[in-house]
């Protein structure tokens, strides 16, 4: 088949695939299609009209797709001051659900593009999402320029399948991924905010009839989104709370219980945050008008929500309930994927074994898999490393956080993992103490000489409080030492007398860690993001929403061959393979360069890691440079997980593309699990603030927050004003022009302006010194 050059070569293929409104565009242009074939009431062209266009238009005419009812495209712009990926992530966090992989179209490589989904017919959809850079293409509103069009930037518009591979095949409409119900719900509700009001009496009657009791999951979720809207990061607090108040009332009108309780909680939060700025009575009056007005709006248009039953307890994605998504944006190329659990566990016999064994033992398959991966990595010699993609070689050392309530299966997961995939020799397990005590699990000093004991330890922490207590001691070195261990760096401390030092050199040891984490007790670990500790963990749930009523039969243990051991001679060369007991331990000596065993990794992993690092170096990309603190090290962690899957699959030489893809699924589960922790901590903190504010009356915490917010807004406006007057100013000079009382808020104001796309920050060099310059984006 010849490569299509334009409209006349491919229009018939689009029609056959279900894209009936395929329209021509001028070559190399994004506009304009033939008159009379766009807009809400426009007809689709018939076959004769398409044939005429194929004959009359230039052979290289571009292609436009007007979407049919039942298909929408999420159009993301992530360039030129537009932050579409961040806007999309905020909306996903609000909806509690991610946009799953689907067919997409783009001519760019910065995360921009159009993602196409099947949706219910006959619905109203918003034209754009709050924030910058995301619009919705839909029947009657805009069109999509499609393959093989040439974009004005000179690139060819290409189709990408849900796995991210370039495709020259036109996708059929039935190939498009169905948009999960929570996202359909969130989008339709945003588009369907009614404008006509019923009478006050009708509104009051509706409000009085709302069902009490405990709030349903849908009500709890909407309340959480409303409280999150009080941070003001995604637009006006007034608008955010007003709109979500109406959403709560609509839920109540459709029979969801607990809306009166949710409205009362939201009122307290609104007054606590905005009362100190606007006055307590004024803020309370505003909220009461939200409720009264919302009652009138919903009474005038009481249409049901779309798929409100999609909000179900459990918190973790499966096909029937939709996908919980991380609260924070992810770097380009590593967005959490919708987890098809059935496909994942059936991908390999050993994964099917892990799931079956876990369910037979009544433990979480994800939690048990995490422990299995930590155990198999612990059994791999420390000189087996990942290649130096960024900086030096990276260790396989792996940290696992098993997330769930106390007593919810951490210990059972560990014992089950040991039985499911036994290791030979058995993995040595210890409990960490101080940072200084970690090296002493590997060696000790006797008579001034270092006595080496072992090269591999799996540290186990039953409750995160234990680790917190150890790390919280005065001058504790535990967390810094664990962070070094994750990378395989040198362990040990410098002492005035060498006879006390127990040095463990880089890549001479294997250290893995499994810790039980209660979501409500994880604040100290999450708060160490600046130190880099939580980024090094793989977060996996200890619950199993899909557990069968009757457990399956317990399978036989899965047998793995021991990793072949190697001996170093005095010259650092390899002299063959021997039993583990015969391997000399030289923990205090560097590993000879020739003795490393560097695993081969797939090209797609190497390319993504390199692109992420390049973007970070330049400070301009949409990879890890845009990732928030809690998403650092994600690609390295994913590569470690892929290597662990390689070992579990019985291979010892190369991490392949399937390992990399399966690791992406595990990372998605990790991101979702960590998101649950953040939501738990956020809801708990907000609830504590509201209760404290109501009890104390003075709401001192809320007052300080409000003052800080006012100062940040004041400084942001000052920055805008000065940049309008003179756009050629360095960041340092601009900061000096801010009043002393407000200068401490400059960084926060700058970050806010950058996040909403009002300003651009560029690196400049002046007199040999590197600095930064802020410039106001057009139209701001």
Image (spheres, rainbow, N blue to C red):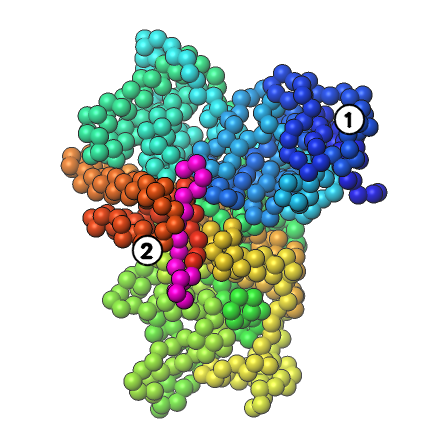
Q: Report the number of discs.
A: 2
Q: Is residue 17 visible?
A: no
The foreground one among 745 and 224 is: 745
Q: Residues within 10 Å of mark 1 (few under 14, many from 20)?
A: some
Looking at the rendered structure, the secondary structure element under dot 2 is: helix
Q: Which mark is residue 732?
A: 2
Q: Residues within 10 Å of mark 2 (few under 14, many from 20)?
A: few
Q: Quadrant of the N terminus?
A: top right
| Distance Cα–Cα, label 2 vs label 1 | 58 Å
Any magenta on residue 773?
A: yes
Q: Position of residue 279 (x, y in %)?
A: 19, 29
Q: Position of residue 615 (x, y in %)?
A: 52, 56
Decide if residue 391 is on the left or right side of residue 598: left
What residue do we see at 41% from left, 41% from top?
758
Q: Report the span colored magenta.
A: 765-780
What residue do we see at 63% from left, 16% from top?
41
Circle 2/circle 1 CB separation < 8 Å? no
Decide if residue 155 is on the left or right side of residue 482: right
Decide if residue 606 is on the left or right side of residue 362: right
Looking at the rendered structure, the secondary structure element under dot 1 is: helix
Looking at the image, which residue sits at the far right? 1
Q: Position of residue 448 (x, y in %)?
A: 36, 90
Earlier-in-chain disc, 2 versus 1: 1
Q: Main secondary structure of the magenta part?
A: strand
Q: Which mark is residue 53?
A: 1
Q: Is residue 339 above or below residue 311?
A: below
What residue do we see at 61% from left, 59% from top?
607
What residue do we see at 32% from left, 48% from top?
748
Q: Position of residue 613 (x, y in %)?
A: 52, 60
């Amino acid at each position: 088949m010849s490569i299509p050059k334009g409209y006349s070569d491919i229009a018939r293929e689009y029609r056959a695939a279900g894209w009936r409104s395929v329209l021509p565009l001028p070559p190399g242009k994004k506009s304009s299609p033939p008159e009379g074939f766009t807009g809400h009431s426009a007809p689709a062209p018939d076959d004769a009209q398409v044939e005429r266009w194929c004959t009359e238009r230039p052979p290289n005419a571009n292609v436009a797709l007007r979407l049919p009812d039942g298909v929408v495209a999420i159009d993301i712009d992530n360039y030129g001051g537009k932050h579409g990926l961040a806007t999309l992530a905020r909306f996903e966090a609000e909806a509690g659900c991610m946009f799953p992989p689907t067919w997409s179209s783009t001519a760019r490589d910065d995360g921009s593009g159009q993602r196409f989904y099947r949706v219910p017919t006959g619905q109203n959809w918003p034209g754009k999402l709050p924030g910058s850079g995301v619009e919705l293409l839909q029947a009657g509103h805009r069109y999509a320029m499609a393959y093989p069009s040439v974009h004005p930037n000179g690139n060819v518009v290409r189709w990408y399948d849900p796995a991210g591979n370039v495709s020259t095949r036109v996708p059929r409409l039935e190939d498009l991924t169905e948009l999960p119900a929570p996202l359909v719900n969130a989008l339709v509700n945003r588009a369907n905010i009614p404008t006509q009001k019923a009478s006050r009496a009708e509104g009051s009657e509706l409000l009085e009839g709302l069902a009490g009791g405990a709030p349903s999951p849908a009500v709890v979720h909407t309340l959480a989104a409303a409280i999150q809207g009080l941070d003001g990061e995604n637009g006006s607090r007034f608008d955010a709370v007003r709109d979500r108040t109406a959403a709560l009332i609509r839920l109540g009108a459709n029979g969801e219980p607990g809306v009166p309780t949710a409205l009362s909680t939201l009122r307290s939060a609104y007054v606590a945050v905005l009362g100190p700025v606007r006055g307590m009575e004024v803020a309370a009056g505003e909220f009461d008008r939200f409720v009264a007005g919302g009652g009138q709006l919903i009474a005038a248009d009481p249409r049901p929500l779309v798929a409100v039953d999609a909000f179900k307890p459990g918190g973790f994605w499966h096909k029937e309930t939709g996908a919980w998504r991380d609260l924070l944006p992810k770097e380009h190329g590593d967005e959490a994927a919708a987890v098809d659990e059935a496909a994942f566990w059936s991908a390999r016999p050993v994964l099917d074994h892990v799931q079956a064994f876990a369910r037979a033992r009544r433990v979480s398959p994800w939690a048990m898999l995490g422990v299995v991966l930590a155990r198999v990595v612990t059994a791999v010699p420390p000189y087996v490393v990942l290649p130096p993609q960024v900086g030096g070689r990276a260790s396989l050392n792996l940290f696992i956080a098993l997330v769930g309530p106390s007593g919810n299966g951490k210990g059972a997961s560990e014992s089950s993992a040991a039985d499911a995939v036994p290791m030979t020799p058995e993995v040595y397990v210890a409990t960490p103490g101080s940072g200084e005590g970690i090296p002493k699990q590997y060696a000790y000093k006797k008579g001034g000489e270092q006595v080496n004991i072992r090269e591999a330890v799996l540290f186990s922490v039953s409750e995160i409080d234990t680790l917190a207590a150890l790390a919280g001691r005065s001058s504790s070195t535990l967390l810094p030492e664990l962070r070094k261990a994750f990378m395989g760096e040198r362990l040990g401390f410098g002492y005035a007398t060498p006879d006390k030092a127990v040095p463990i050199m880089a890549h001479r040891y294997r250290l893995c860690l499994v810790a039980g984490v209660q979501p409500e007790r994880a604040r100290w670990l999450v708060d160490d993001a600046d130190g880099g500790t939580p980024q090094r963990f793989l977060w996996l749930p200890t619950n199993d929403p899909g557990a069968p009523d009757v457990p399956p039969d317990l399978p036989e243990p899965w047998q793995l061959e021991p990793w072949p051991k190697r001996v170093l001679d005095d010259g650092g060369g390899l002299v063959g393979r021997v039993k583990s007991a015969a391997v000399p331990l030289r923990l205090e000596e560097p590993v000879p360069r020739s003795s490393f065993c560097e695993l081969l990794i797939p090209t797609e992993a190497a390319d993504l890691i390199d692109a992420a690092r390049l973007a970070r170096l330049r400070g301009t990309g949409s990879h890890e440079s845009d990732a928030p603190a809690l998403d650092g090290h994600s690609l390295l962690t994913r590569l470690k997980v892929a290597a662990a899957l390689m070992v579990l699959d019985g291979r010892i030489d190369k991490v392949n593309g399937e390992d990399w893809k399966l690791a992406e699924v595990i990372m998605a589960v990790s991101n979702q699990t960590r998101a649950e922790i953040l939501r738990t901590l956020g809801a708990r903190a907000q609830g504590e603030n509201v209760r404290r504010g109501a009890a104390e009356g003075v709401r001192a915490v809320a007052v300080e927050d409000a003052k800080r917010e006012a100062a940040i807004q004041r400084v942001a406006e000052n920055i805008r004003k000065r940049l309008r007057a003179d756009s050629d100013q360095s960041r340092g000079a601009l900061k000096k022009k801010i009043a002393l009382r407000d200068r401490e808020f400059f960084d926060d104001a700058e970050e806010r302006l950058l996040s909403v796309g009002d300003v651009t920050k560029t690196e400049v060099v002046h007199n040999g010194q590197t600095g930064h310059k802020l410039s106001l984006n057009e139209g701001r």
